């Protein structure tokens, strides 16, 4: 069974002891069916590292759950959710499982001496140099040799069921998403997910709201569907829901990146999330939640997914393996409300029939054999060091010309440029010096734009990033010096 990281909300400022909070949240996850009988959970050491707490409260919580019969410790194998749970728990879980099954039933129906585009500050690029290439090659070779004729033929447009089940299990445990395998739709990356969602939810001239500034790829997907995009401003708390409510006309859907706003990096507050969900319920609108790189956070633990707070089935959740593995794997996914399932599958078939089966098979093993959770844990340390090197370099070489807007999470830093500096001009100058960057102004759909840069740090090591900030400093000095 899959062992993964967990989303466990821990409040260090409250009066409830940590061991009671951990016990309570793990027990609730079992009661709610997010952790299933027989599922392996992380070791006490791994969970304490993940929660950034000492090991003692985790040990105490595990001991209590073991004593009460919720967990089962197997010598040499790990800790698992008990296959035989207490009677009252079995009844509760069975009722919820039946309800979920009933809900799903109707739905069955230029670069520096490198390859082009891999220069320092390239956006959306993970640490390709730290990926477990040998392991991945072994998994691919194993499954390539064992491909059956059925697996070599046309695949299920929704994706192979073992991968859908593994993704659902990971999302329930790590992101607090409420979903079953039957709601997971495998697609060729998050951009494909946006195109499928736009095809299902939007018709020509429909209104769709999105964050301003926001992800250009989403704006392009909505416009390709013939929809009209309305901008909603973003502040330190995320999308301004009050501004969304003031939009005229019937807004069919809204697109948000609540865990790590693209491009500014803020996290949507709980109050804003609840207000957005209430708006969607009242208006009969859909919310597209793009959770593109929630796995990496450096300042505090993130809130769980917005979808997990949704009591009315109005959120379509989008995720991808491009940032946690590598972009060319081209595997992303949606979690679709049961009422929309058939339409999403039909739209997905119209897009490109199905995703490559071989990569899906390898991903199943990568997830279920704990390679994925180990890779995530290791990469958090790698990215923290790279982020810190970038911040140190910016402070030493560029401080007079920039303000760091947000560096709390993800694989990029958003910076604002000093007055008088045009980000498009700066990017052109950077390109001539071998640096790859994105102008913040390109993320705006309307005229009022801020001048800034989006600097990716995932794809370059610390030394290379620090040296790149020196070059950026020289570029900024020249850009700010009048002729």
Image (cartoon, helix red, strand yellow):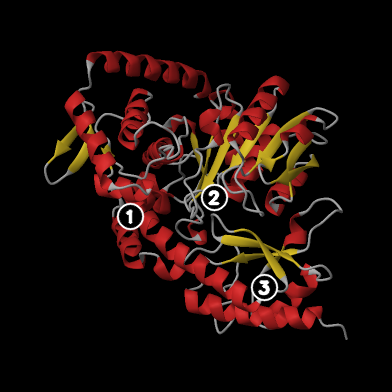
Say what secondary structure mark 3 lies in: loop
When the figure is inspected, residue 379 is found, relative to residue 114, above or below; the finding is above
Residue nearest the observer in this picture, 29 or 13: 13
Which residue is tagged 2? 188
Give how far apart the Cα atoms at labels 2 and 3 are: 40 Å
Give how far apart the Cα atoms at labels 1 and 3 are: 36 Å
The reply to whether residue 167 is in sight is yes
First-in-chain label (2 vs 3): 2
Q: Which mark is residue 171?
A: none
290 with respect to 473 (left or right): left
* Residue depicted at x 53% and y 45%: 319
When the figure is inspected, residue 149 is found, relative to residue 179, above or below; the finding is below
* Residue depicted at x 51% and y 56%: 322
Which residue is tagged 1? 374
Quadrant containing the N terminus is: top left
The local crowd at label 3, few if under 14, some if 14 to 19, many if 20 or more residues have their Cα within 10 Å, is some
Between tags 1 and 2, which lies in front? 1
The local crowd at label 1, few if under 14, some if 14 to 19, many if 20 or more residues have their Cα within 10 Å, is some
The local crowd at label 2, few if under 14, some if 14 to 19, many if 20 or more residues have their Cα within 10 Å, is many
When the figure is inspected, residue 39 is found, relative to residue 404, above or below; the finding is above
Give how far apart the Cα atoms at labels 1 and 2 are: 24 Å
In percent of width and height, residue 186 lies at 50, 42
Residue at the extreme left of the image, as rendered: 75
* Residue depicted at x 43% and y 37%: 9
In percent of width and height, residue 198 lies at 69, 39
Say what secondary structure mark 2 lies in: loop
Circle count: 3
Which residue is tagged 3? 399
Quarter assignment of residue 65: top left
């Amino acid at each position: 069974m899959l062992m993964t990281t967990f989303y466990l909300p821990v409040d260090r400022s409250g009066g409830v002891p940590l061991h009671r909070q951990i016990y309570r949240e793990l027990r609730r996850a079992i009661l709610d069916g997010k952790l299933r009988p027989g599922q392996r959970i992380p070791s006490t050491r791994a969970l304490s590292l993940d929660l950034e707490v000492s090991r003692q409260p985790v040990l105490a919580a595990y001991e209590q759950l073991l004593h009460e019969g919720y967990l089962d410790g197997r010598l040499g194998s790990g800790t698992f959710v008990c296959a035989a749970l207490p009677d009252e728990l079995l009844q509760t879980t069975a009722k919820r499982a039946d309800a979920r099954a009933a809900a799903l039933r109707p739905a069955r129906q230029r670069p520096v001496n490198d390859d082009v585009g891999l220069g320092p500050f390239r956006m959306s690029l993970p640490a390709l140099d730290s990926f477990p290439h040998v392991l991945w090659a072994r998994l691919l070779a194993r499954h390539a040799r064992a491909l059956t004729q059925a697996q070599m033929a046309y695949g299920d447009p929704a994706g192979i069921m073992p991968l859908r089940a593994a993704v659902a299990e990971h999302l329930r445990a790590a992101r607090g998403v409420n979903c079953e395998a039957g709601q997971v739709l495998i697609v060729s990356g998050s951009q494909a997910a946006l195109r499928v969602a736009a095809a299902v939810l939007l018709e020509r001239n429909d209104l769709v709201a999105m964050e301003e500034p926001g992800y250009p790829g989403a704006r392009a997907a909505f416009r390709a569907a013939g929809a009209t995009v309305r901008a909603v401003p973003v502040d330190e708390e995320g999308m301004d829901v009050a501004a969304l409510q003031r939009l005229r006309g019937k807004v069919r859907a809204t697109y948000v990146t609540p865990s790590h706003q693209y491009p500014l990096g803020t996290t949507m507050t709980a109050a804003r999330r609840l207000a957005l969900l209430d708006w969607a319920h009242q208006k009969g609108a859909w919310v597209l939640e793009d959770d593109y790189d929630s796995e990496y956070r450096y300042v505090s633990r993130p809130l769980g997914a917005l979808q997990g707070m949704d009591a009315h089935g109005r959120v379509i959740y989008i995720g991808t393996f491009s940032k946690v593995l590598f972009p060319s794997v081209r595997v992303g996914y949606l979690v679709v409300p049961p009422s929309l399932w058939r339409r999403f599958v039909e739209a997905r078939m119209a897009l490109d029939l199905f995703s490559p089966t071989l990569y899906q098979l390898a991903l199943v093993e990568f997830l279920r054999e704990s390679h994925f959770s180990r890779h995530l844990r290791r990469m958090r340390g790698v990215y923290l060091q790279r982020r810190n090197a970038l911040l140190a370099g910016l402070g030493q070489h560029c401080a007079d010309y920039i303000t760091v807007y947000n560096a709390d999470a993800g694989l990029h830093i958003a910076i604002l440029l000093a007055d008088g500096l045009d980000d498009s001009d700066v990017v052109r100058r950077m390109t001539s010096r071998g640096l790859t960057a994105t102008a913040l102004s390109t993320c705006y759909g309307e005229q009022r734009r801020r001048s800034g840069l989006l600097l990716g740090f995932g794809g370059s090591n610390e030394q290379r990033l620090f040296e790149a900030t020196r070059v950026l400093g020289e570029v900024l000095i020249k850009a700010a010096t009048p002729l």
